[in-house]
Amino acid sequence: MLSPAVTRLGLLADARLEFEGGKLVGWKSKGSPKMLAELVEAVQPDKRVLSSVMVGLNPLMRYENGQDRMVSGAIGFGGFGFMGTVRRGSLTVAGKALVQKGKLAPSG
């Protein structure tokens, strides 16, 4: 679930985004469904791709105060009109888990 994010249309309260191969294939929002639909539909389907993915590494940072993207285990992303942060997400790359439920996966 996406944490609240500032967009060109205002504050997006929440969003659940689904990606396959870096392309956005599904989206839902309980608190801002119209805004999320407008943000997504303003971008051509073939352009709805991730442009950046970030993984927070700093265990001293805490959520809020604009530092969400740096918190250990946070997943940040950008593309198709806004940037967002996922607090308790999971990220797997090439079959290897990097983040599991908001925590950095053990290496090894």
Image: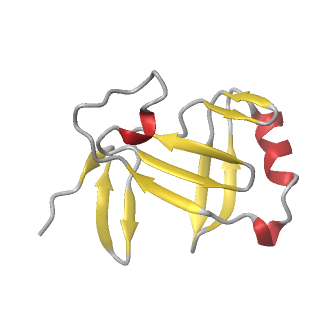
Which residue occupies the foreground of this view, 19 or 79?
A: 79
Q: Is residue 71 left or right of residue 44?
A: left
Left or right: residue 42 versus residue 78 is: right
Depth check, front residue: 53 or 96: 53
Q: Where does residue 62 sit, x and y in percent of width and height?
A: 33, 27
Q: Residue at x 54, y 52 (%)?
A: 77
Q: Residue at x 57, y 43 (%)?
A: 84
Q: Quadrant of the C terminus?
A: bottom left
| Residue 84 sits above or below residue 62 on the image | below
Residue, far left:
108
**Residue 107 found in image quarter:** bottom left
Tell which residue pokes out farthest to the bottom in this image.
94
Give the percent coordinates (x, y) of residue 70.
Answer: 37, 40
Residue drawn 28% across and 47% down? 57
Residue 56 or residue 105, whichever sits in front: 56
Q: Position of residue 60 (x, y in %)?
A: 23, 31
> In this picture, is 98 found above or below 14?
below
Residue 31 vertical placement versus 56 (above, below): above
